[in-house]
Image (tube, rainbow, N blue to C red):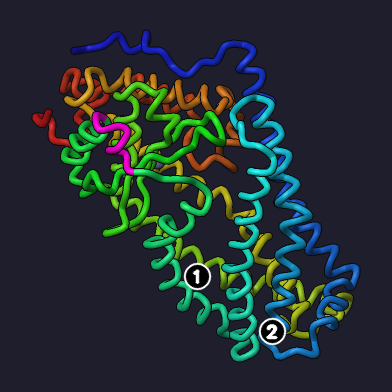
Amino acid sequence: MPKIQSAAPVYTLAPPQAALAHHLALLRLALHFGVELGVVLLLVLLLESGLVQRLARRVESRRPWAQTALFAAALLLLLDCCVLLPADALLQHALLRVGISIQSWPGWLRDQSIATLLLLVVGVPILVFARWLLARSPRRAWLWFWLASIPVILAAALVLPQIVEPLFDHFSPLAATHPELVAQFERVVARTGTQIPPERMFLMQASVKGNGLNAYVSGIGPTKRIVVWDTTANRMPQDEILFILAHESGHYVLHHLAWGIALGIAGTLALLWLTMRLAASLLRWRGRRWRIESLASLPGMVVVLLALVLLEIVSEPIGNSISRAIEHQADVYGQEAIHGIVADPQQTAVAAFQHLGQAWLEDPHPSAFVVFWTYDHPAIQSRAEFAAHYNPWSIPSTASGHPRYFPPDQK
Ligand SMILES: [Zn+2]
């Protein structure tokens, strides 16, 4: 049925909530750039003060791999304790005040400890391997490192969600507590052609930590599964959960994960090549002052890390722009996929964005620059506005045109 499109509601917050959301957005922004600046400053300080040299001398009596492992562990712990942890603590403090988080500080500390352990378990072997390559092949190390990273990235996409997620949260079969949701999910799953049986639909106990809403699909191939936060299953209307699920299915059907992995692998190649060039330039510029002759030395690793961090910071908008485009596609797909399953896909999508925005206190008016630089999803306001105006089934000749992903005659 045709709709009066201009009358469609979009994302709004009551004035007190809007003010809170604005302050929270400012804090998130300050922390975002503060962490980036903090990491850069700390690395520069370590190099300029000669602390890296002293740290390197402390471990030099050991075997090369043990030297690198100890040095890398110390470096990662320093970054974690001086920059990442304080920033997370500030955010947790703010989220507790506005009620998005209800997690106790001991519980928060437990999660942070697991995250720090993971950082060491993953980061130390990577740095040991990188230094070994740099020592063996200074000119081509970036290329060998990139080749070795490909199977690691693929394996991580396959198994990481199933290994890492249970370390932080509790999962149980969705059918045990929400059989009606499973039955509805199966309708969406059948429509989108994603093969996820009920045994791979899970409920995550998010309510012990906070009031945020979420549902997602993770893993690839045989490890693919649907996860719904209990906050979502218990508080959000069923139609809206189906929309979120349909959005997530869109990522699979439109091969976003495969594209993401391919772009990630290609981006890593460019990033590693540029990192080595920038690190070499930094060494030529400040090497004598820092008393560093080679990038393969322990202090040289800090120069490589500094170059990598600088490049990741300036390339951030590229990854985020691609991510926003992909997320928009999934929004369109999600809205089309629930057509015929829910009564009004447009209103369902708009209401879902409203609920998600309220739950996370999303800023209704983020600046264009902030969205461009830091948002990996389109702003919730623009997502809601798009949903309110997107109705390709109304009349075939409207500006919206035909559905993009489902044939016009399909219900
Ligand atoms: Zn998405």
The answer to whether marks 2 and 1 mark residues whose Cβ atoms lie closer than 8 Å is no
From the viewer's perspective, is 354 left or right of 293?
A: left
Residue 179 included in the magenta stretch of the image: yes
From the viewer's perspective, is 60 left or right of 336?
A: right
Instruction: Check disc 1 and report its element: helix, strand or loop.
Output: helix
Q: Quadrant of the C terminus?
A: top left
Q: Quadrant of the N terminus?
A: top left
Q: How many marks?
A: 2
> Which span of residues is magenta-colored?
173-180
Q: Residue at x 58, y 25 (%)?
A: 363
Residue, far front: 176
Q: Residue at x 58, y 51 (%)?
A: 316
Q: Of the residues shown, which amino acid type is indicated by label 1?
A: Leu
Within-10-Å neighbours for mark 1: few <14, some 14–19, many 20+: some
The residue indicated by pointer 2 is 66
In percent of width and height, residue 358 lies at 52, 22
Residues 103 and 394: in front is 103
Residue 74, which numbered label? none
Q: Residue at x 84, y 81 (%)?
A: 58
Q: Residue at x 72, y 42 (%)?
A: 89
Residues 402 and 20: in front is 20
The residue indicated by pointer 1 is 269
Residue 376 included in the magenta stretch of the image: no
